Image (cartoon, rainbow, N blue to C red):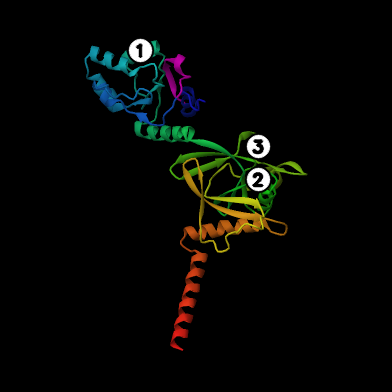
Amino acid sequence: MVKVRTKDIIEKFGLELISGEEGINRPITMSDISRPGIEIAGYFDFYPADRIQLIGKTELTFASKLSESERASRMEQLCTDVTPGIVISRDMPVPEELIEPSERESVPIMRTKQNTTKFSGMLTNFLESKLAPTTAIHGVLVDIYGVGVLIMGQSGVGKSETALELVKRGHRLVADDCVEIRQEDENNLIGTAPELIEHLLEIRGLGIIDVMTLFGAGAVLPSKKISLVINLETWDQHKQYDRLGLDEEKIKIIDTDVTKITIPVRPGRNLAVIIEVAAMNFRLKRMGMNAAESFTERLNNVIVENGQEESES
C-alpha cells in the first residue's frame, strides 16, 4: 500500500508545480532526500534516482557554468522513470534544460520559497513520519501523568472500563479498542486512534460514549509515545505473580522493547488506581528510584547484621 505520493508533498508544503504533472501520483518510498550536486558535476554511477531530488543555489549556480550540451545531458539524466520528483528551492528559476525531459519522463518539477536546508529538514521529518513502520494493536492507550500506558488484555477483561475510570481521575484518553502504532525512530513508538473511533470509548451495557463531549477537550489526546504496557489477565490461582517488582518483563512492538507489567484481575481490585500507581512507579524508576531494589538491599543488610550478631554471641 502506497503511503505517500508526490502530490501529498505538493499539498503539504504548498509547492508550485512547474512541469511533469502526469507524474504527481508517483510513490515516494524513501524518507532520504538527495542533493544531486555530484550528479550535476557528471558522476551518475550511484545516483539515488528513487528519492526526491532537492536542488538549491549551489547546484544551480554550478549548472549555469556548464556548457549548454553538458547541462542538457545532466538534467536529462536526473529525470528517470522512478524519480518521484525534483524540488527547486529559494524560488529560483528552473533551467529550461530540465523542463523538457521532466515532461517526457513525467517527473514533477516543483518549486518552494523556502531555503534549501530548512525545506530539507521539514520534508525529511514529514516523510519519516509517513513512512515509519506501523502496526495496530487491540488495546487502550491512556496518558497517565505524562506516561503513555498501553492497556492490553483479552476482550471483556475490563480495559475500556478501566480507561473510563482513569479519565474520570483526570488522565487523558488517546485510543480505545484499536491503537495504531508507528515507530518514528529507534525506541520511539507513537500511538494514535483510527480516525473513525477517535475520542470514543465502548462500554459494555452502555454502548459508545464520546469522551471529549462528556469530559471536555482536556480529557483526550491525539497521540502519545508508548512507554509502558499493562497486560490485564483473569486471576489464575495456580500462577505465581511478581510480588516485589524486581524482574522487568519486556514486550516487542515492531522493533522496540517496551516495559510490560502483568496485573491479575479479580473482583475487588481497583484497576484504575493500580495502573495509576504503576505509571508513577515507572517514572520513579526512570529517575533512578527503585523501591523494590531499595527494599531488597535493606533486607540483605538486616540479614547480614543479624548473622553477625549471632556469630558474636
Amino acid type at circle 2 is Gln
Q: Report how far apart the C-alphas of labels 3 and 1 lie in the structure.
A: 46 Å
Q: Are marks 2 and 3 in contact (CB under 8 Å)?
A: no
What are the residue bounds of the magenta stretch?
14-27
Residue that lies at the very extreme toward the bottom in this rendered image? 313
Indicate the position of residue 184 as horizontal and vertical percent values: 46, 39
Amino acid type at circle 3 is Ile
User: 10 Å neighbourhood of mark 3: few (<14), some, or many (≥20)?
Assistant: some
User: 10 Å neighbourhood of mark 1: few (<14), some, or many (≥20)?
Assistant: many
Choose mark 1 or mark 2, whichever is in front: 2
Q: Is 308 contained in the magenta span?
A: no
Choose mark 3 or mark 1, whichever is in front: 3
Kindly identify which numbered label has been placed on residue 197.
3
* Residue 199, image quadrant: top right
Indicate the position of residue 140 as horizontal and vertical percent values: 62, 45
Residue that lies at the very extreme toward the right in this rendered image? 205
The answer to whether 178 is drawn above or below residue 263 in the figure is above
Residue in the picture at 24% in, 12% down: 69
The answer to whether 137 is drawn above or below residue 92 in the figure is below
Judging from the image, what secondary structure is the residue with disc 2 in? Answer: loop
User: 10 Å neighbourhood of mark 2: few (<14), some, or many (≥20)?
Assistant: few
Drawn side of residue 65 relative to residue 116, left or right: left
The answer to whether 101 is drawn above or below residue 201 in the figure is above
Amino acid type at circle 1 is Pro
Indicate the position of residue 204 as horizontal and vertical percent values: 75, 44
Q: Is 22 contained in the magenta span?
A: yes
Residue in the picture at 33% in, 15% down: 98
The residue wearing badge 2 is: 154
Judging from the image, what secondary structure is the residue with disc 3 in? Answer: helix
Please count the marks in the image: 3
The residue wearing badge 1 is: 101
